[in-house]
Image: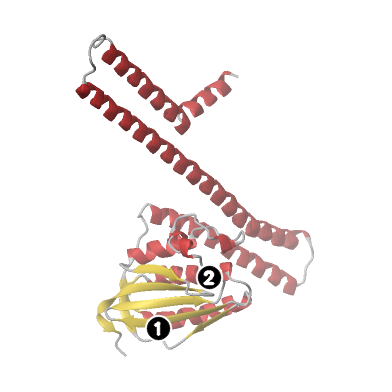
């Protein structure tokens, strides 16, 4: 019982609400002390305007301090709710493939299955392990980026050839979800970039379109040159993004209203952080139905890649 009381006392003592109350009580005592110190020496005399003015300044500082504490406490409470919601979503997203892997392995261990069925179970378990690995890596990468500890290995990269190779591998993945991944001609543009991190940027942008758009979504990827910059566009024909959310979607843990319970709130934060680490910029436009994500990267000194 004593341990439970001690835990409760520590939780209350180190909680934000306790310190808000404590600071306000301290200020109230200081205000009372100021009034007493002002009244006693000036009893029966006209009040001093200078001392009264300093008292008003002190009172204004008290009111300002209280407002700052209340706003800070509200932000902490909102952040705590967001983090709890994120932990709940990630736990569910990681638990689902883990349960599927366990089911397939139990099938192989406890039942007599044909070689074809055995291979199907192993392939399904392998895919679920890939989903699990992707989810865990996303959480770890977001944590490293938030602390600015993600390593970026910049090297000369032909963006046109890189995008063509990426799209050739990604088209089948998108098609299995019912979507279409399209692209136009890719000019040969050379920049300094980390190929692995560039693939993460594209994966998150494409997966974001698949997550927020209805089945059958059409995703268009393009590459153009804009003076000394390379511009990568990822456009979809989904419902679009409201004007008030276009900046917020790049925040850590933020999910747009169109998420419909899907997504972890990490993907676009990872995109924005990786683009910034490459010296570029990213933003989203939604002129009507659909969204267009623009990724702008500085070109290398050569600009166009050698044929």
Q: Position of residue 280 (x, y in %)?
A: 33, 69
Residue 295 or residue 134, whichever sits in front: 295
Tell me where residue 29 sits by quadrant: top left
- Between discs 1 and 2, the one toward the N terminus: 1
Q: Position of residue 119 (x, y in %)?
A: 69, 71
Find disc 2 in the rendering and name its residue: 240
Q: Residues within 10 Å of mark 2 (few under 14, many from 20)?
A: many
Indicate which disc residue 115 carries: none
Q: Does residue 253 lie above or below 64 as drawn?
A: below
| Figure colour scheme | secondary structure
What's the residue at 38%, 64% (across, down)?
274
> As drawn, is 28 to the left or to the right of 215?
left
Find disc 1 in the rendering and name its residue: 161
Q: Does residue 12 lie above or below 114 as drawn?
A: above
Q: Position of residue 172 (x, y in %)?
A: 58, 79
Dot 2 falls on a residue whose secondary structure is loop
């Amino acid at each position: 019982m004593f341990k439970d009381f001690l835990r409760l006392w520590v939780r209350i003592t180190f909680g934000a609400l306790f310190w808000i109350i404590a600071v306000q009580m301290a200020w109230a005592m200081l205000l009372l002390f100021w009034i007493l110190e002002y009244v006693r020496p000036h009893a029966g005399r006209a009040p001093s305007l200078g001392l009264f003015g300093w008292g008003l300044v002190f009172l204004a500082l008290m009111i300002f301090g209280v407002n700052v504490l209340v706003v800070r406490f509200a932000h902490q409470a909102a952040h705590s709710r967001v983090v709890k919601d994120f932990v709940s979503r990630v736990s569910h997203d990681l638990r689902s493939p883990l349960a599927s892997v366990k089911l397939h392995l139990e099938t192989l261990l406890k039942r007599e299955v044909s070689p074809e069925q055995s291979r199907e179970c192993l392939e399904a378990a392998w895919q679920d392990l890939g989903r699990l690995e992707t989810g865990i890596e996303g959480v770890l990468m977001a944590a490293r980026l938030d602390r600015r500890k993600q390593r970026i290995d910049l090297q000369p990269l032909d963006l046109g050839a890189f995008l063509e190779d990426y799209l050739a591998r990604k088209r089948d993945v998108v098609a299995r979800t019912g979507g279409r991944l399209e692209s136009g001609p890719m000019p040969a543009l050379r920049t300094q970039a980390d190929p692995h991190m560039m693939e993460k940027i594209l994966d998150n942008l494409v997966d974001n379109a698949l997550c927020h758009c209805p089945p059958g979504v059409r995703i268009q990827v393009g590459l153009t040159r804009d003076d000394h910059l390379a511009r990568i566009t990822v456009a979809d024909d989904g419902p679009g993004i409201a004007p008030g959310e276009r900046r917020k979607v790049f925040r850590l843990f933020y999910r747009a209203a169109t998420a419909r319970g899907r997504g972890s709130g990490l993907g676009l934060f990872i995109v924005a952080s990786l683009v910034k680490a490459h010296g570029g910029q990213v933003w989203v436009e939604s002129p009507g139905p659909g969204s267009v994500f623009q990724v702008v990267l500085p070109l290398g000194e050569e600009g166009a890649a050698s044929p």
